[in-house]
Amino acid sequence: MKTQIFVDADACPVKQEVYRVARRYDLEVTLVANAWMRVPAEARIRLQLVEDGPDAADDWIVDQIQADDILITADIPLASRSLKKGAYVLGSTGKPFTDDNIGQALATRNLLSDLRDAGAVTGGPRPIQKRDRSRFLQSLDEMIQAIRRKHASAPREGAESP
């Protein structure tokens, strides 16, 4: 089984970093978006357009993603749904979403949404910084290495176990 990288692409600020790491590891990348965008003309990088709709891209990703695939997203509910399928999930600032932190991330998201609705919070997330890009590259590399180690230590199908 070969790991694929899925990108929730409409507002993703780290696409170039994803391409660079995917080339190094010879991985396929699927960018999922509601609108056309330019992507490198490479066989391993493709754009999947989905119809407009509040969760069309999220639903497509969850239908396609498998255990040990990687998702790049800032969408916390999408991250949660993908973790449940056994995928690895990385935010665009390089912070991984895990089974251990997704509950807190969802609670914080819901609280901030309520505060925004009440007019108490008017800003969105801060712009991505150079250190975020660096952390992202390191985290994605570590994630791919962890998946590879996991598969290298797993017994092969049909092999006898001691």
Image (cartoon, rainbow, N blue to C red):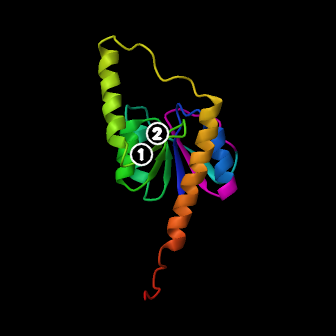
Q: Position of residue 135 (x, y in %)?
A: 60, 40
Q: Residues within 10 Å of mark 1 (few under 14, many from 20)?
A: some
Q: Magenta stretch: give its range.
A: 24-40
Q: Tell me where residue 149 appears, x and y as whole percent.
A: 54, 66
| Residue at the spot of label 2 | 50
- The answer to which of 52 and 61 lies nearer the viewer is 61
Q: Looking at the picture, which amino acid does disc 1 mark? A: Trp
Query: Measured from the top left, where is residue 23 in percent x and y?
Result: 68, 53
Q: Residue at x 61, y 28 (%)?
A: 129
- Gap between marks 1 and 2 measured at Cα: 8 Å
Specify the quadrant of the image occupied by residue 60: top left
Question: Relative to residue 30, is residue 119 depicted above or below?
Answer: above
| Neighbour tally class for label 2: few under 14, some 14-19, many 20 plus, Cα within 10 Å | some
1 vs 2, front mark: 1
Magenta includes 114?
A: no
Q: Considering depth in this image, is 53 or 114 the residue closer to the camera? A: 114
Give the residue at mark 1: 60
Q: Is residue 41 left or right of residue 123?
A: right
Q: Residue at x 51, y 69 (%)?
A: 151
Asked if the residues shown at circle 1 and circle 2 are in contact, with their CB atoms under 8 angstroms apart, the answer is: yes
Q: Amino acid at mark 2?
A: Val
Percent x, y for residue 161? 43, 86
Task: Look at the picture and state if 22 lies above or below 101.
Answer: below
